[in-house]
Image (cartoon, helix red, strand yellow):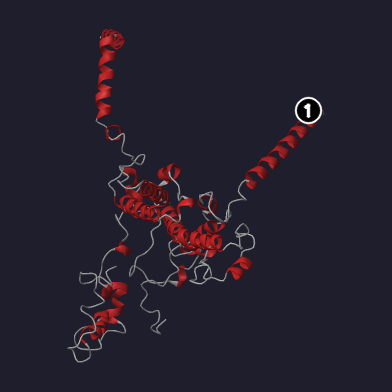
Amino acid sequence: MIKILFLLHLGLFRLICKLLFCVIKSRVFIVGALACSVFWLSSCQWLKGASTPYFTMTNFKVPDGTPAFKSGFKDGCSSVLYSRGNMFYRTRYKYKYDANMTGNSEYRFGHSRGYSWCFQKVLRGPVASFDRYLYDSGYDKTFSAKDINQAWDGMFLDGPMKHGPDSSGQGLNGMMSIWQTGIDGKSSAFGSNPLWAGGAEGQFFGLW
Amino acid sequence: MDSITKKITKFKIFKYFFVLSLTLTLSSCFWVPNWYKPQGYTIFRQMPKGGSPGFNLGWIHGCESGLGTQFGGTMYMTFYTWKKDPDISSVNPDAEKIRRRYPKELKKVNWENPADIKKNFDDYKAVFWSAHIFCRHAAIGLLQTAGGFSPGEGFAPPVAGDSRYDPSQHGIGNVWKLHGKGDTRIGTGYW
């Protein structure tokens, strides 16, 4: 019984192989495979945007601009792909800075923009999954906006500035309120509180 | 007897070949500044070519300064430190003083030509921060990816308020432990 089953399977296998061989050999199959490949490849973004300069193995696109700006952007992005990229990117990219363009402000601007833009993308994605592990938190927490009074275990709030110079507030804000409202609480040296000049409460000089 | 002689001869040839290869391999590193320091060879060989002497000096100083920050931790800070030249960065630089300070590095500067001196100093200042940022990121980037392909396996520096300085953990291997960031005892007289 087992022998019969084995022979049947063997026969079936040979039949399938023969059929496959015939199909592969046929011109129809070859033409079909070629057509599929062309259609599949044409949907690829790198082929669609063949005139658009992309960074290899990323979806980073060089923005429009003057040739000097674009060159700077590319060099800046390449630099950060090395410095903050994983080993794969380190084999592909390296630090670039055109030594003859130091006097060109457009190049320098492009370099700076390319570095910072790609820095954000390298850290946050969405790039290929294999570099998501670069920073598992997604971004560098030290650069996120937060209340200066809460930083360093609330050093400013509970430390030496626990009691503000006036009754209006504690921590650094209390100290700054003197500048804003004056000792009499009415006259102001500034139009707004210089400490929270970032536009959002909790941002230190608009940076943190 | 013959076979032993052959073996000795073979060993000698191998030895000479080995020494020669080692010499050639190592001598190829020497042109790279700081090649023997952490990431020295891999990073400093990326210094762009074709720059003015001022550009090259600015790049090296920027990179050394960047690698000597807390981004690299104790290990990198042991080998690198802040290098920005205050005289070159000055609004009114003393060219003679700088020329004497860098006789080798700025040898090719035409010290008789004020425009060339200015260009070199401008190049120094233009590239310094770019190299600084790149190199400090390269240090932290490598340390963060040191763990492999899974999240959270690499080294990660603490952020403000995450940890206090623990003297018992002070060690070169503990790359980020030697810091006072977040320690409210510093400057309070309690520590």
Q: Residue at x 30, y 62 (%)?
A: A141
Residue A136: percent from left, percent from top: 31, 53
Which of the 4 quarters of the picture holds residue B108?
bottom right
B74 or B70, nearer to the observer: B70
- Residue most toward the bottom? A184
**Left or right, residue A183 beside residue B148:** left
Q: Which residue lies furthest to the left in this view?
A: A186
| Quadrant location of the N terminus of chain A in the rendered image | top left
Q: Which residue is drawn at 61% across and 69% down?
A: B96
Relative to A88, say whether B33 is above or below. Answer: below
What x and y, as percent, mark residue B148?
40, 47
Residue placed at 67% from the left, 45% from the top?
B23
Residue B180: x %, y % from top left: 41, 73
Mark 1 neighbour density, 10 Å: few (under 14) some (14–19) many (20 or more): few
Q: Residue at x 53, y 61 (%)?
A: B115
In which quadrant of the rendered image does the C terminus of chain A lie? bottom left
Q: Mark 1 points at which residue?
A: B3
User: Against A93, is A119 above or below?
Assistant: below
- For badge 1, the amino acid type reads Ser
Q: Nearer the viewer, residue A23 or B88?
A: B88
